[in-house]
Amino acid sequence: MSCCGPTPGYQELDEVSRLVSAKLAAFLRTLRDNDFAVGLHEGRDAASLMAAGYAEKPGLLRSAFKHLFSARKTDWDRFDGLFDAFWLGKRVRSRSLTTGAAKAANSPSLKSLQDTPPQPAAGEAATDQVPSAEEAPEPRGGEGRSEGASRADNLAEIDFRKMADPGQIEEAHAVAARLAKTMRTRLTRRDLARRRGYRLDLRRTIHSNISHGGVPISLVKRQRRQKPLRLIMLLDASGSMSLYTGVFLRFIHGVLDEFRQAEAFLFHTRLAYVSDAMKEKDSARALDRLSIMAQGAGGGTRIGESLQTFNRWHAARVIHSRSCVMIVSDGYETGDAALLGREMAALAKRCRRIVWLNPMLAWEGYAPEAAGIKAALPHIDLYAPANTLQSLAELEPYLAKL
Amino acid sequence: MKDREQIAQALATCGYIADGELATAISLMQLLKRPLLLEGEAGVGKTEVAKALAAVHATELIRLQCYEGLDQSAALYEWNYQRQLLAIQAHRGEQADAIEDQIFSEKYLLERPLLAAIRRDKSPVLLIDEIDRADDEFEAFLLELLSDFQVSIPELGTISAVTIPHVVLTSNGTRELSDALRRRCLYHYVDYPDVDREARIIMARIDGAGASLALQIARMVENIRKEELRKVPGVAETLDWAAALVGLEVRDLLEVPETVHETLMCLLKTHEDRSRLTREVTGRLLGKVA
């Protein structure tokens, strides 16, 4: 059905607009795939923008769409690349990676790690399949005796690294997640119990007693607002920690799920913000996304540099006066130990408490000799072992006191 | 589109030198009737955008400064209790209903910024400053207001907007804002200006700053921003410094390295940064300006 006249007919115009809207819809899907929060409303606005003449020049349309679709700085930085790739057919520029430290380039980035084929989530499962039954008497014995309900208790005392079969590990993960939840509920209840006003709110009292002619019959009290505790977790995912990473990731997932205010970071040779990935409700999926990140960079741990990145780019946003920073690491610093000391000092100034969990602390004959941990120790408020579920649970009263 | 250039020009005459993208954002604000969320480091001129916008529209600027614990009575409306009590005393003996009708009327209503913003005859610019400092609860409440532009007061009924205000929100990123609020808004990230724009800002704002001096100052500030500093100086600090230099009758930065070093206190606000920029470093940075 073509039109012969010089001006395009309605049908052709319809055709064009159909094509454009299909293309626009595809673009919206691309944005959604890239974690942009784009809804129907934005789509409609985008269409009206194109109709209003913003589509005349690509630069203008890009700028307009950028304002409409971005919701935060990271979106803002990535948008131009996505737009060009989709509408102008250019390759995506690597702009999105430049926000972190400049040195990121020479260490394997998390992004590149994602391309490696995913390996089984719990690294230890593969190697620990063939332990000789005689060699680990303590946990084995526990397993033999355990039946039904008592099983979880037994698990609580087993060092994560000695857990052998995948089922046991799976269960430890579940317990860690449950533990995170109970910690949350108990913390809130304690908060509620304190909710008694200690001061009279004169303004509200008068307001609510206007109907009595101003005679103060019902009193309104006020209490100081309590900021909820915010927990910020920095998890060392380097090679030396690999036996523990799985369990802690599960714990962090539980905490993020339940705490209203919690943030999580992962570091090995550089720092990655993982709260968004971890907030996925389905823990298996979240762990999949994460374990890929956690696997990599077996090289070493640059705690100092990671903390520097944290202090510089994230601290102002995530830390407030009632924040507790929890670092889970063995303290084997392969970078500059002096830098770690400096950054720890800066961090200590910002937050209320620093808890350092070191799974190796409970090992026999372990002493904090590593240069990294020595530099960090003066700034730590609580230095505790975290090799069993029991030791994780023991943290809760400490956190409740904050 | 023509109106973008017009907007940029109008802003410039009001003393705000905008980049092209901001002009787009403002034209979108008008087209889509959405609020504009400005994010960026402290001191890059987020609040100034709202002020300039009000000047461009020749309308009132209503400002709501957010802080922790900000509640409805400080942001939206409050009854004038003192006058209500007086009125009750004065009308003692009358019908209770009559008194009630009277004391819960417009006359006894104190309007706070948010209510004021929707009751003006000419759309004002509503600046909600540092929204990240307010609590989550307030943010949720604000969301409701920004989508419906109506306020319900239990004693008085629902008040609908006479005009829709131009809403500008700013955030310093001390707290992560909710996705819902972000989605409602257009987003613009205000970055540190480039040398050229910063020089023009200095010339627009500081009387007596010549083009060559302004350019030198802008270059120097850009060099300083590249140093590893705890607190990176913003545009406000640049303007302070420029004003100081102009006040000291400096014509050329290169001629007076000593003065330059001593007046850096306008830019560097922590002891650590101050001690990091030693005389030698200042000299080196000045060398790059030339």
Image (spheres, rainbow, N blue to C red):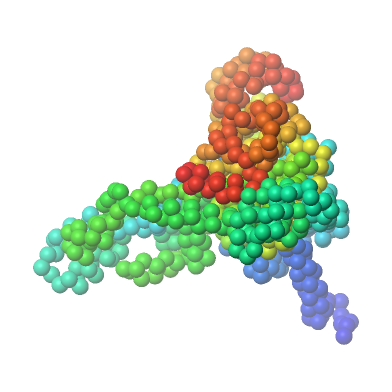
Counting labels gives 0
The residue at the point 71 percent across, 22 percent down is: B285
In the rendered image, the quadrant that contains the N terminus of chain A is: bottom right
* Residue A286 picture location, percent across and down: 71, 58
In the image, residue B257 lies at what x, y percent? 65, 15
Instruction: Work out whether residue A50 can be spotted.
Output: yes
- B211, above or below B131, in the image: above
Q: Nearer the viewer, residue A202 or B151?
A: A202
User: Picture coordinates of residue B259 (x, y %)?
Assistant: 60, 16
Q: Residue at x 67, y 19 (%)?
A: B282
What residue appears at the point 55 percent right and 52 percent down from the top-left corner? A261
Q: Which image quadrant is residue A354 in?
A: top right
Residue occupying the point 36% across, 71% down:
B157
Residue B35 vs A19, above or below: the answer is above
Residue B203 visible: no
- A265 and B175: which one is in front? A265
Please state the horizontal and vertical placement of residue B74, each as a whole percent of the image: 38, 53
Q: Is residue A214 above or below residue A314?
A: below
* In the displayed structure image, the side of residue A13 where residue A66 appears, left or right: left
The front one of A77 and A289 is A289
Quadrant in which residue B102 is drawn: bottom left
